[in-house]
Image (cartoon, rainbow, N blue to C red):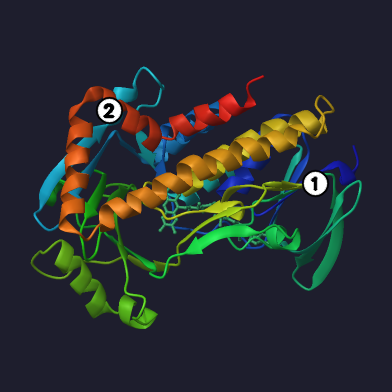
Amino acid sequence: MTEKDRVIISGGGPVGLICALGLARQDVPVTVLERNEDLLDDPRAATTHPATLELLDELGLEEEVRAAGLVAPVFQFWDRTSGELIAEFDHALLSEETRFPYVVQCEQFKTARIALSHLQREPNAEVLFGHEVTGIAEGEDGVTVTVRNGERSFTRTTPYLVGADGGRSLVRKSAGIEFEGFTFLEQFLVLTTPFDFQSWRGYSYRSYFADPQEWCNCFKVAADGPPGLWRTVYPTDPQQQEDDLLSDAAVQARLQKFFPKDGDYEVVHRNLYRVHQRVAKTFRKKRVLLAGDAAHVNNPIGGMGLNGGIQDAVNLAGKLAEVWQGRATDALLDLYDLQRRTVTTEFVQAQTIQNKKRLEARDEATRQANFRDLRETAGDPERAKAFLMRASMLDAERRAAALGAP
Ligand SMILES: Cc1cc2nc3c(=O)[nH]c(=O)nc-3n(C[C@H](O)[C@H](O)[C@H](O)COP(=O)(O)OP(=O)(O)OC[C@H]3O[C@@H](n4cnc5c(N)ncnc54)[C@H](O)[C@@H]3O)c2cc1C
């Protein structure tokens, strides 16, 4: 083995780190290049679905993720205008389908840290912080990657380059892979508060609020320990300036409109996110592979983006290891593209777009039809189970597996 045999992963986010761990565990030498000096305390993803917990368990990470997060078997749909609980779904209905009939609410920086701590115990894995990939050049036998580390620039050649470098992926752009889809006009605002919405309002750890003017997601994360934090997510008016949206007065008004209470809310984070629905035209171009947000982005309603990314990472690590070890031809990497791109489009994109439509419906007849459908689905165990199979991403993983069946 020489330096040139190492697989290189651009991006040490949760997806890059988990892909690296999967490779290292299968004796493939791997280097992760991460431009930041350390993992960021990134407050984005939290919901980890049953299908992903199964994969994390195979890597020996599930127990630690569960211990760092909150177990949430139930989620709810509410109508904000009437204050009525429309439907509640309990993952217990999936107990014959999975060993993990719940989601775990674990902030993505914790999942990334757990993956990193395991990766650092693997002798054939290397994680280089403060190393930014600035260019790639594809050759017949490998990809040459240009890397900047402070004032210094150098190149490395790898048989396979994995772009796990997020939504603005330099790897994807440099490989000339289109990122097809659209960007929503409105940004999403996330406001985080320690106010206990369960004790005071009866909301479950994951609650979705339909509202013709301004929908909301409200969910709990463990943070640094009890009592934890609640994150609320809203759409914003595209005409409004960011400073106005994030001002103290605007933030308090928004929380009070949704959840009136005496006195101001304590707000510990406020973030605005631009939201897209995009899928790369291919997840594989010769020796370049894409995973996670570099390959697909979606709105966060339903919490599927990182889950899909972790599912990419584990799928890709398995196949790349087979190819690297010489046990399979590189045609196996086309199957990675087929499996993961198909489920990204059929499940993650379709589901998250539908989730948003359901919450934001304006027309009263449509809203009432949505509520009727949700009530009937929750009230019928067979339909509720089918709904949960999709929401938990178990259907997506099974569809991907079926695409790979001989
Ligand atoms: C408000 C919000 C809530 C969300 N909630 C959920 C949820 O509940 N569940 C869920 O599944 N998903 C959720 N998501 C989506 C989730 O956050 C992303 O899908 C996830 O971060 C993707 O992980 P990643 O590792 O692919 O990319 P990233 O987390 O973006 O990591 C990419 C890494 O690559 C590094 N990098 C970039 N360019 C370079 C370069 N040129 N060289 C070297 N390094 C580079 C970056 O520094 C970064 O560390 C949410 C998103 C938002 C905005």
| Residue 223: numbered disc | none
Which residue occupies 32% across, 74% down?
237
Q: Is residue 376 above or below residue 150?
A: above
Between 193 and 48, the one lying in front of the other is 48
Question: Along the polypeptide, which appears first: circle 2 or circle 1?
Answer: 1
Q: Residues within 10 Å of mark 1 (few under 14, many from 20)?
A: some
Residue under the point 40% across and 52% down: 353
Determine which residue is flagged by label 2.
383
Quadrant of the image for the N terminus?
top right
Place of residue 35 in the rendered image (x, y in percent of width and height, measured from the top left)? 67, 62
Left or right: residue 3 versus residue 25 is right
Q: Which residue is mark 1?
A: 287
Instruction: Decide which of 132, 373 is in the foreground and name it.
Output: 373
SS assignment at label 1: loop
What is the number of callouts on the image? 2
Q: Quadrant of the C terminus?
A: top right
Foreground residue among 262 and 79: 79
Residue at the front extreme of this rendering? 365
Q: Amino acid at mark 2?
A: Arg
